[in-house]
Amino acid sequence: MRNIFRWLPFLCLMASGAEIALDPLYENCGVSVIGEPDTRSITMRFREKGSASWKEALPLVKLPVQIRAPTHGNFFGKDLKALPVRENEWRGSIVLLRENTPYELEAVLSPGGKILKTEFTTRNSKVRVVKTVYLDEMPKDRPLILEAKGTPDGWIRYTMKDPKAFISGMKGFSRVILVRNSEYLLLEGLTVRGGARNSIVLRDSRHIQIVNCDIAGHAPVLKQALDDDGKYLAADGGKMWSCAAVFIQDSSDILVERCYIHSPAGTANPWFFSHSSGPMAIATRSTAGGLVFRYNDLTGSDDHRWDDAIGGGENDSPNGGFNRDGDIYGNMFALGNDDGIELDGGQSNIRCYRNRFEGMLCGISVAPCIVGPSYVFQNLIVNLGDFTNRGGLALKTVFGDIGVGRIHYFNNTGSGIGFGTRQPTIELNPRLVTRNNNLAGNWQIHKLTIPVDMDYDLFHHEIAEREESTVKALADEKQELHSVRGKPVYESDTDRSYRLKNGSPGSGTGTRIPNFQEKAGGDLGAFPEADSPDLPYRPVPVFLNRSQIHFEFPGKTTPQKLILRAEKNFHSEFKVRKDERGDWFSVTPSEGGVRNGKEIVFIVTLHPEKMRRAKRYKDAFLVRMADGFSRPVMVYADMRESKELRAKEKGVLLEIQADAMRNAGIYEKGDLPGALQLNPAKEGEPLIWEFEIPEDGIYYFFGAFHTSGLMRNLFEFSVDGDKSAPLEIQMLAGNYRNHAWRHLFRIDKPRGKYYEIFRLKKGKHTLTIGPKREGVVLEKIAVTNDIEMIYR
């Protein structure tokens, strides 16, 4: 943990014993106040120095001082563990400030009305370079290790003399560039390719900037360990934990800005097999704060997905993740099999805002928030789904323990909040504060398991009874007294803008949130005002009329138009950037210049002849300026109904309706065509499927079924007369009351393995299903050697 006296120029000690310490970054400032024993609240106001008008900030949050220490196999141990905070410490943030600008701050302690006054200046990202080193002139027969120290007034810049050159990893080394024991270094304009595990590693370093770099091609895979837990193995044969393009360890005060981190060589396994593991764009471990990641494009692809786009180590530690005093804003997170970002850990004065998340399993993970407070606001979290097209939560608070810190969740658009378990006997209410969010989507709350303060949010579920259960659960806890219900209507369905149309549910119903949303009456969600910035936020006067392109077969496969507009007096060269392996679509022109406000028309063309199967395709491209600022676009193509593509598929998929299996006649019909109600009274006469495999291989079984009861002990099955055992619950299989394909597996070892493979020879085989309890409706069974043929 950082010492509270780190920022001595911004520290004010009062004779009463109260103290205030500030930690300003570029656009936000963390505040810490040591109050008095009888302090019950601390309010703040601030202003630019010299301004006549003050602005109100959110009140500070009193920090917990202890937590239940976890024990093996139990997140809640018997012993209390001290947190790295001081007695009577309060923390909070002032947000949306201007860079390199002086401010005045006043904090008022109540009761008593004592005032703490201080001043601070936000950081300046523009640094003075006194020395430039060209990496393409350094020796190429040895690992690239940078170990140097500049000064606050004299930074050392590392770049390329030839801007078209790139740096690649040496065989046998896990990284391309190692920066260690260094200070005040600027890595700018680098193109980095490869790295067995990482592209750039920062270790034991402070005040490092990585700006306008293009990083790709790290973390190739050796094989998938199907006989273990289904994870891919790295080139060195180990599991792919912390295989990040940029890996930051034991470091602080790091800026990663305007970087294009993309196209890993390998991919992450989906949760179908086990906990996702694979390449990440950025990962942190044992950091001391001051991390700022802004205006970056972190884009995987459908076949080369991230694990987490940004992962944090030591999730269950108060110093884990980003630890404290960090900012993540204006970033694009795309295409991964786990979280867009893990804020998990200490999460004290961590701000995550104005980002965009698409194609991840979950958006933002905040569990646990051990110290807090954290602030998550104005994020767009849409089109969630991993490699198997299973989507999770926009805000993931599901962990063995959610922690004792407070999470603020304001003006976000995205479906789903998961509620983790509360820490017993330690109560600092509330753990989660929500306001002005657009939460419409297919999620629901059955019961609140943590103390919350929720209000002024928009709710909608396509299934009315599930919307009712959510509203009831909230009403039972006297939450959401001013919530809005109804399906949101957006300004445009073609560009998927997610801006509410006038008159839509949630339009004009927002409440004021000091310093975050100054006006009452704004729209609910990530775009509260008409002039709210496009997301991800980029401070560049270049705009696109669409942020998504959607193709669909049949009927919508013709080329689509995208228009770029720039303000007058803005000039820049641009290039269209995408994963070169994603050749199923193209964009023209691929490069050019933005000139004096003139429009540029791009044509996005679908290439079905390049596609190898009938499925939903997803990828991203950027219109990227010379300075690294960009506008990202997601491209979707739903080709599931293409017979031509289905004919290309080489996998084996055999299916049978339940009522076509042997002994089907003794079971009652189900509520779907071909379905049967599994009756445990018929356990002695199981359903039997005799099928013939056309080729040797590794196969998986699936069932399309649903149940109105508990998701346990539904039925048992055996293959070719092996020992019959009950069906296990598949991870992320959704609510079992929903009818869907689910993997059939019986084993639970090793722990965390969620699948079962069958090595079947060409020829005839038998699957036997024995009912275990009532309320289960089975529609059909399938066997395949290619799970993508199920999860299209």
Image (cartoon, grey):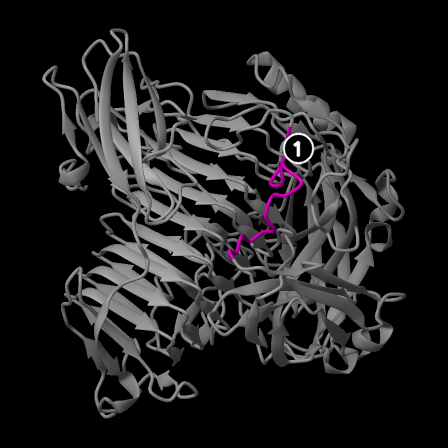
Residue 643, percent across and down? 86, 73
User: Which quadrant is home to the N terminus?
Assistant: top left
Which residue carries the number 1 mark? 523
Q: Among all residues in the image, which is located at the extreme left?
A: 15
Name the quadrant containing residue 761.
bottom right
Around disc 1, counting alpha carbons within 10 Å, would you say few (fewer than 14), some (14 to 19), or many (20 or more)? many
Q: Nearer the viewer, residue 419 or 698?
A: 419
**Start-end of magenta stretch:** 522-539
- The reply to whether the magenta stretch includes residue 526 is yes
- The reply to whether the magenta stretch includes residue 653 is no
Q: Nearer the viewer, residue 645 or 118?
A: 118
Q: Is residue 583 left or right of residue 9?
A: right
Which residue is pictured at 14% across the width and 65% down the height? 181
Name the quadrant containing residue 319.
top left
Name the chief secondary structure element in magenta.
Answer: loop
User: Callout 1, which amino acid?
Assistant: Asp
Secondary structure category for the residue under label 1: loop
Is any part of residue 611 visible from this angle?
Answer: yes
User: Which quadrant is home to the C terminus?
Assistant: bottom right
The image shows residue 475, relative to residue 388, as above or below, that is above
The image shows residue 558, relative to residue 687, as above or below, that is below
Residue 282, percent across and down? 38, 61
Which residue is pictured at 74% across the width and 32% down the height? 775
Name the quadrant containing residue 771.
top right
Q: Is residue 599 left or right of residue 352?
A: right
Residue 241, percent across and down? 36, 62
The image shows residue 630, relative to residue 607, as above or below, that is above
Q: Nearer the viewer, residue 408 or 492?
A: 492
Q: Is residue 465 left or right of residue 446?
A: right
Residue 534, percent across and down? 61, 51
